Amino acid sequence: MREADQLIAGALRDIAAEAGLPPPVADTAWRAGRRRRLTGLAASAASVVGAIALALTVLLPLAAEPGPAAPQGAPTRLVSISLWPPKPAAAGALAATARILLHRAAYLHLPAQARVSGPFVVLTGPAADETQLRDLVASAVLNFRPVLLYQPHRGTNPPSGVQRYGDASLVNHSTLALFSKLVCTPASTIPWEGQVGYIGGNFDNPAAQVVSCDSSGGKYVLGATTVRGTQITDATAGQSTTSNQWAVMLTLNRAGTVALSALTSNLYDAYASAGQGGDQNDVVLDTVAYVLDGNVISTARIEGPIPGGKLSIQAGFTRAQAQVLAAQLQGGPLPAEFLISDISTSAASASS
């Protein structure tokens, strides 16, 4: 049995690699298949491949650990990142933004400073840490949304009639039109929002159905937000105790806990049974998407109600990626929209 399991696990990883999917997806499919084999149930090859193609992740416990170790020695050069709000922001919002940025930097043990300068917020730290500092200035608005439609990426020139999963009858006419128009590209750094004419923050309107992309090129229609990033009280990076994959553990406040419990209970009761029987449409509908600043960073199939207000996001993160995401979520989202208006470097003074 052990040798057979190892052969199956290797085959699933090969299939996932050919499909451009991360190894955790294959591992998830292997674990699910092993449970079925141990109970004498046989899953068809089509069902296994379908489960891999959907790229669904699972909720896992973590062995949490603190952020990166503090750097040694004083920096010789500094980088300053100036943030400008395209819509006028009150003095209180600017001051709150500076505090949040400092909180994020402290989680990563970065010796940074944040200050308000007129209408700008300026984050300054070691030039060697510019990449991490740039990551910290993201809005970091995290929303939990139910998945209504999903279409996997099928190359730059996909055949007509590419299969989509979910239930189009749950989608309003205007959003369905945006879904048809949207083209998602794997690992693209070009914003997709302009393709469908989203203006301002409409691409992540928490009260509305929206379309979105993930890093694999999959595209989605997502329902209205049910749990919001403002309901997160703590975020910690760590390794899963079962898969050794890096993930981010979230703790929700009371309102978030109630909302998550209701969402997962409703999805599980409505779709889990049919999904376990191999219906890929119900598998998708039994899924929650974690949406960061409008982009799907991970999805999780609901295997039961989640009543405790604790869950983990696993998306094939590296250690650094998990730690940066945890830092971004530590102090909550920025209170206003900001754009990077300038990045400059300078020599560090003796007092820096």
Image: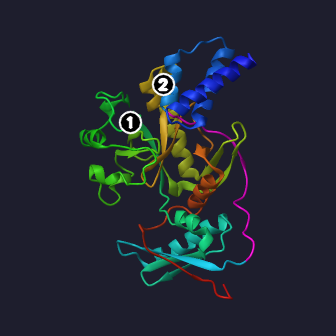
Residue stretch rendered in magenta on the structure: 55-73
Residue 69: x %, y % from top left: 74, 63
Residue 71 sits inside the magenta stretch: yes
Is disc 2 in contact with disc 1, using a CB cutoff of under 8 Å? no
Of helix, strand and loop, which one carries label 2?
A: helix
Q: Quadrant of residue 329?
A: bottom right
Q: Is residue 314 visible?
A: no
Residue drawn at the location 66% of the way across and 64% of the way down: 107
Magenta: main secondary structure equals loop
Marks 2 and 1 sit apart, C-alpha to C-alpha, by 17 Å
Q: Earlier in the sequence, mark 2 or mark 1?
A: 2
Extreme bottom residue here? 350
Count of labels in the image: 2
Q: Which residue is mark 1?
A: 155
Residue 264: x %, y % from top left: 52, 36
Q: Which residue is mark 2?
A: 50
Residue type at the position of mark 1 = Gly
| Label 2 packing within 10 angstroms: few (<14), some (14-19), many (20+) | some
User: Marks 2 and 1: which is nearer the front?
Assistant: 1
Residue 221: x %, y % from top left: 36, 40
Residue drawn at the location 55% of the way across and 65% of the way down: 136
Residue 323 sits inside the magenta stretch: no
Looking at the image, residue 304 sits to the left or right of residue 83; the answer is right
From the viewer's perspective, is residue 83 above or below residue 329?
A: below
Residue drawn at the location 32% of the way across and 61% of the way down: 200
Q: Is residue 86 visible?
A: yes
Residue 273: x %, y % from top left: 51, 21
Of helix, strand and loop, which one carries label 1?
A: loop
Residue type at the position of mark 2 = Gly
